[in-house]
Structures are given as C-alpha cells and as structure tokens.
Image (tube, grey):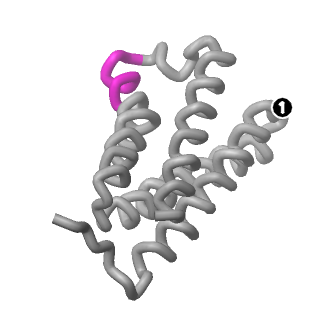
Amino acid sequence: MKHGRSLAAILITLMGTAAWSLWTANGIPLRSSTERAVTWAGFLFGLPLILLGSLVMEQRWAFMGAVMYGTIGLALDLSTIVQELTQGGSQASVLVISGITGLLNFLLIAIGGRRFLDANPVTRSR
C-alpha cells in the first residue's frame, strides 16, 4: 500500500496548500457568493477527504478518482499560471502557489495512474 500512502500524503499537502493560500489571501476567493464558496471549499477539501477515506478503505477506484482530481487541479493551475503571466502585473505568490500545486497534481496523476493500471488488483482479506 506504498502508493496509497504517497497519494494520501499528496492529498493532505494539497489541502494544506489550499488552506494556506486562502488564509494568506484573507479568503478573497470566498467573498464572491456563498454558493461559490461552498462549491470551491468542497473541491479543495471535500473531494480530497473522500478520496483519503477511500484510500484508507483500500478501494481501487480511489486511485482513478485521484487521477481525475489531479487532472482538473493541474488544468486549473496551468490556466492560472498562463493568466498571471499574460497579465501586466503578475503576482509572484500566485505563481509560486500554482507551481507547487501543479507539481503535486502532476504527481497525483502519475502515482494514481500507475497504481490503478497495476496488473495486481487490491486484495482484501475478509
């Protein structure tokens, strides 16, 4: 279950990075509306918690869920980086955070995909 621990560590780090970036930005992304705040919090914290629980219960589908979550996260990170670089006054902190989370999301895709495609299915003793 080495890969499951790696994915769990990456998911926890992603949640910590999201919490840190929201805390340092004084919650600016969450001020727009309550509905958006709940949706964004669900994506940043709810889905990783569900994936963590599934990894603990040794559900094989959690690896593909981690790949899908990482793919969406990586796309958001890349679009944020491109947007910041094409604007005149880009913020270095946004670029750094997006770079870190982009790397973590890439690792989530690579490790989760490798584990999901592994020929040996997860066996549980009953």
Relative to the observer, which residue lies in front, 15 or 96?
15
Q: Determine the image quadrant of residue 96.
A: top right
Label tally = 1
Where is residue 48 drawn, in percent x and y?
A: 42, 43
Left or right of 24, for residue 59: left
What residue occupies the far front of the structure in this picture?
A: 125
**Predominant secondary structure in magenta?**
helix
Residue 51 lies, with reference to residue 45, above or below; the image says: below
Where is residue 24 drawn, in percent x and y?
A: 68, 17
Secondary structure of residue under mark 1: loop
Residue 5 lies, with reference to residue 116, above or below; the image says: above
Q: Residues within 10 Å of mark 1 (few under 14, many from 20)?
A: few
Residue 27 lies, with reference to residue 103, above or below; the image says: above
Where is residue 44 drawn, in percent x and y?
A: 46, 36
**Could you tell me the amino acid type at mark 1?**
Gly
Residue on which disc 1 sits = 89
Q: Which residues are magenta?
A: 33-39
The quarter in which the C terminus is drawn is bottom left
Residue 117 lies, with reference to residue 7, above or below; the image says: below
What residue occupies the far left of the structure in this picture?
A: 126
Q: Residue at x 51, y 55 (%)?
A: 5
